[in-house]
Amino acid sequence: MSPSLNHLHVTCAIIERDGLVLAARRSAAMSLPLKWEFPGGKIDPGESPEECLRRELVEEMGIHVSVGKSFPPSTHHYPTFTVTLHPFVCSIQSGEIVLHEHAAVTWLPLEELHTLDWAEADVPVIEYYQRGCRRRRGSG
Ligand SMILES: Nc1nc2c([nH]c(=O)n2[C@H]2C[C@H](O)[C@@H](COP(=O)(O)OP(=O)(O)OP(=O)(O)O)O2)c(=O)[nH]1
């Protein structure tokens, strides 16, 4: 992973349950305040993306997740830093969500995810996810 200080490598969890997807709202005190995102965080040195996700989900929400398939990374240049997001489809193995950092969470059908004000790096991830689901349903 890049050692550059202003290029962050960040994991994010696309958590599916009962046909809905979890979105989390960043708090007013975080960077990108009040933007919606997939939970996750910066990959520590020596940590795999999957280890990072499992750690972050416990720290941020008190849940244990199993990590499934990855989506292509998404790189976005914000005005003062760059983020490469490493998304993985996840499911909750145990625990109830308790918010330690985020302002809110919501569960939405995939088709409604775009109604939220997402961190910009997430927009291509959501589009990729929606395209994949439409293809599986055979609707182009
Ligand atoms: N966790 C997460 N972060 C995202 C997403 N999209 C996106 O642009 N980011 C940005 C927001 C943050 O600048 C960075 C993630 O790092 P983080 O969540 O550990 O960052 P933070 O700013 O809360 O932590 P800190 O530096 O204040 O300790 O990546 C996303 O879907 N999930």
Image: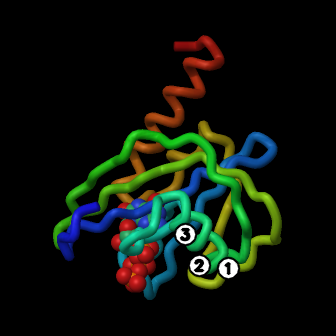
In percent of the image, x 21 and y 59: which residue is there? 77
Q: Report if residue 35 is visible in the image.
A: no
Instruction: Measure the alpha-carbon separation of dots 2 and 3.
Output: 5 Å
Mark 1 residue's CB less than 8 Å from ligand 1: no
Residues tagged 2 and 3 counted as in contact (Cβ below 8 A): yes
**Residue 137 - label:** none
Question: Circles 2 and 1: CB distance less than 8 Å?
Answer: yes
16 on left or right of 8? right
The residue pinned by badge 3 equals 25
Residue type indicated by callout 3: Arg
**Does the closest atom of ligand 1 sit within 8 Å of the Cβ of label 2?**
no
- Mark pair 2, 1: CA separation: 7 Å
Residue occupying image coordinates x 21% and y 70%? 3
How many residues crowd mark 2 within 10 Å: few (<14), some (14–19), many (20+)? some
User: Along the polypeptide, which appears first: circle 3 or circle 1?
Assistant: 3
Q: With respect to residue 65, does 27 lie above or below? A: below
Image quarter for ligand 1 equals bottom left
Amino acid identity at mark 1: Leu
Between disc 3 and disc 1, the foreground one is 1
Pinpoint residue 37: horizontal percent, then vertical percent: 49, 61
Q: Which mark is residue 99?
A: 1
| Mark 3 surroundings: few (<14), some (14-19) or many (≥20) residues within 10 A | many
Q: What element carries label 2?
A: loop
Please say if 93 is above or below 62. above
Which residue in the protein does label 2 denote? 103
Quadrant in which the N terminus is drawn: bottom left
The amino acid pointed to by label 2 is Ala
Q: Mark 3 and mark 1: span between their CA atoms?
A: 10 Å
Taking the view exactly as shown, the residue that stands out farthest to the bottom is: 29
Q: How crowded is mark 1: few (under 14 residues within 10 Å), some or many (20 or more)?
A: some
Task: Where is residue 54? Give x, y as percent.
Answer: 61, 66
In the rendered image, residue 44, in percent from the top left (x then y), is placed at 41, 74
